[in-house]
């Protein structure tokens, strides 16, 4: 069961004087339940690829060619309206800085509740509360954070909140772009474990963008290696990252 299929996928940045071919000729299939790590050194095109899949690059100076099939649509050709609908219902993304998107002056619970209400305007109070509790449990946070303000939480807790928020609408595909990179190694390790654990009860396919191969080793079943915008290798983690 295919979730995402990229065919001859290219991304170019066009500046006044030059073109930068940031992502070149990517052919890649992601199946339901896969957790695919996309690794490569800085500048290899990882973020460009992720943002291009989400169609979050500015159209003014970028060009995407090829196709990207997701939810029976080619996202490369999709209209702004179709994209909005698909992102809204089926996609999610967590960035390194996602936690910064939380409002400092509203309690965590209120913020999650507001986002839930945007998705389900007619939801009953108890339904919302049950859902939020379940989401918090999924990312190993106690209900106590519900009443807390962002400044009262550690970076790791805030990023867990960001992950919980990304799962609010039950996305089919979750893209994590260096989502744990800014955290200390202990916290990072804990959150990575939690991600693997939470997926045992979720129906989500994940793309993990990272410069850190150990992140892929602990949380992914497949790996794709980017080098200078090109896909060097794709396969199962157990085959590619096996001990020598
Ligand atoms: P990172 O490696 O963490 O993705 P960079 O330092 O490469 O960050 O990029 C920081 C910002 O500058 C980003 O918004 C990126 O899109 C932009 N950028 C990166 N390379 C170029 C470039 N060659 N020309 C113009 N903007 C660039
Ligand atoms: P990574 O995420 O692996 O660090 P990026 O996707 O940020 O790689 O960058 C891939 C290539 O595209 C790099 O050569 C970078 O300099 C270039 N690039 C990134 N953003 C821009 C931009 N806004 N304008 C021009 N070139 C860019």
Image (cartoon, rainbow, N blue to C red):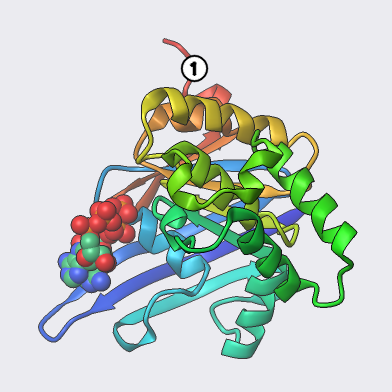
Determine the residue positioned at 63% across, 56% down: 165
Task: For ligand 2, tell me if the residue under mark 1 lies within 8 Å.
Answer: no
Q: Residue furthest left?
A: 17
Q: Residue furthest top?
A: 244
Determine the residue positioned at 72% across, 49% down: 204
Relative to 100, does residue 141 appear above or below in the rendering? above
Q: Position of residue 240 (x, y in %)?
A: 48, 26
Relative to 77, does residue 20 appear above or below in the rendering? above
Whether residue 199 can be seen here: yes
Image check: 202 left or right of 59?
Answer: right
Depth check: give the residue in front, 113 or 34: 113
Q: Quadrant of the C terminus?
A: top left
Whether residue 44 can be seen here: no
Image check: 143 left or right of 98?
Answer: right
Q: For label 1, count other residues whose C-alpha is less than 10 Å away and answer few (under 14), some (14-19) or many (20+).
A: few
Depth check: give the residue in front, 111 or 216: 111
Determine the residue positioned at 47% across, 23% down: 241
Ligand 2 position by quadrant? bottom left
Q: Position of residue 40 (x, y in %)?
A: 33, 43
Q: Position of residue 211 (x, y in %)?
A: 34, 40
Query: Hey, which quadrant is residue 2 in on the image?
Result: bottom right
Depth check: give the residue in front, 40 or 86: 86
Residue with the mark numbered 1: 242
Q: Position of residue 35 (x, y in %)?
A: 61, 41
Helix, strand or loop at label 1? It is: loop
Determine the residue positioned at 43% across, 22% down: 186
Relative to 231, does residue 65 appear above or below in the rendering? below
């Amino acid at each position: 069961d295919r979730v995402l299929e990229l065919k001859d996928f290219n991304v170019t940045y066009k500046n006044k004087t030059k073109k930068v071919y940031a992502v070149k000729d990517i052919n890649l299939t992601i199946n339901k339940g896969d957790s695919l790590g996309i690794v490569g050194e800085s500048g290899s095109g990882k973020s460009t690829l992720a943002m291009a899949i989400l169609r979050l690059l500015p159209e003014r100076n970028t060009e995407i060619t090829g196709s990207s099939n997701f939810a029976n649509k080619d996202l490369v050709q999709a209209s702004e309206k179709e994209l909005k609908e698909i992102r809204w219902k089926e996609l999610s993304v967590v960035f390194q800085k996602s936690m910064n998107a939380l409002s400092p002056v509203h309690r965590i619970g209120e913020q999650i509740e507001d986002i839930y209400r945007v998705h389900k305007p007619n939801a009953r109070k108890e339904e919302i509360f049950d859902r939020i509790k379940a989401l918090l449990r999924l990312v190993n946070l106690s209900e106590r954070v519900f009443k807390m303000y962002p400044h009262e939480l550690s970076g790791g807790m805030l990023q867990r909140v960001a992950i919980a928020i990304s799962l609010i609408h039950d996305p089919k595909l979750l893209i994590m772009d260096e989502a744990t990179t800014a955290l200390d190694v202990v916290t990072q390790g804990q959150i990575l474990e939690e991600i693997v654990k939470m997926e045992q009860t979720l129906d989500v396919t994940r793309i993990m963008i990272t410069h850190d191969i150990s992140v892929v080793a602990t949380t992914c079943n497949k790996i794709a290696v980017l080098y200078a915008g090109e896909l060097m290798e794709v396969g199962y983690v157990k085959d590619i990252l096996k001990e020598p």
